Amino acid sequence: MKHSYIRVTLASLFVILAGSALVGFRAQVVKNTSAANGSEVVVELFTSEGCSSCPPADALLARLSEQLTPGNAQVIALEEHVDYWDELGWKDPFSSHDWTARQYAYAGALGNGNPYTPQMVVDGSVEFSGGRAQQAQKSIAEAATRTKAAVMLSQGTSGKPGAETFSVQVGRLSPSAKGGPVEVWLAITETGLHSSVTRGENAGHELKHAAIVRSMRKIGEARADTDTSFSGNATVPLRTEWKRENLKAVVFVQEKKSLRILGAAEISLHS
């Protein structure tokens, strides 16, 4: 049931970026680093535990993120639980109005004008019903052929209890003429989450999820006229109930107006 509501980059560039990241962490210990290889594709799923057609889409996103898809694409999964189902029988414990607002932004940018669940968005450029496996495979394969910005994400030691520090480096960009400013976003996701639903459309079902977005925030803007369009550090608080072994950090570069994603990287958090 739908609920309507409102690449190839030069190897030398990676060497330069890696060196820059290490310099930025001279006073810290770099524990984990990931440099994007150009095949990363960000797949967002707007979903809800109150929606009966969402569990198959959640399962599809999990499968896509666990294997290489056609074109050797590496899917970076962002499962975002909207909150407009929360008054319809079951309050989703993972829902946030922030993800609803993000879905509304896509409705404007992509022209469908009518947010719904489950909705899948690939690299901020194309949307479709989240349960359509063939459409997902096709869209991801096409996205993997596009030239992406070189992105590197490094994990360091923050020195603050309950927080994690990351270093982000972004190479030269190829923004669109009408895309607007290019923003850099950092998200934390958690896998292995599930719920025993007692009310609403999924009452009596045990629901399992892919990479649920726990937090997401803009950490800066990139400049399109330099070889290193962005370089910076960001500290993110981690809640005690989040299981560290299931956490990943995701950084992606996105045009503010078009919402097209120009590059991304992902790392698992190490203890």
Image: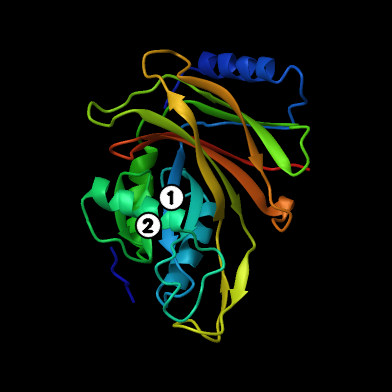
Front residue of this view, candidates 227 and 255: 255
Percent of width and height locating residue 166: 64, 32
Percent of width and height locating residue 37: 51, 31
* Residue at point 45%, 72% (across, down): 86
Percent of width and height locating residue 263: 44, 33
Label 1: how many residues lie within 10 Å, few (<14), some (14-19) or many (20+)? many
| Callout 2: SS | strand
Q: Which residue is mark 2?
A: 120
Q: Quadrant of the C terminus?
A: top right
Front residue of this view, candidates 97 and 139: 97
Which image quadrant for residue 249? Answer: top right
Is residue 107 visible in the rendered image? The answer is yes
| Callout 1: SS | strand
Say whether residue 129 is left or right of residue 221: left
Q: Amino acid at mark 1?
A: Val
Label 2: how many residues lie within 10 Å, few (<14), some (14-19) or many (20+)? many
Q: Is residue 8 above or below residue 102?
A: above
Asked if the residues shown at circle 1 and circle 2 are in contact, with their CB atoms under 8 angstroms apart, the answer is yes
* Residue at point 53%, 32% (across, down): 36
Q: Which residue is mark 1?
A: 43
Q: Is residue 87 above or below residue 138?
A: below
* Residue at point 41%, 72% (across, down): 85
Say whether residue 6 is left or right of residue 199: left
Q: Quadrant of the N terminus?
A: bottom left
Q: Which mark is residue 197?
A: none
Q: Is residue 107 above or below residue 205?
A: above
Is residue 137 visible in the rendered image? The answer is no
Q: Amino acid at mark 2?
A: Met
Which image quadrant for residue 8? Answer: top left
Figure label count: 2
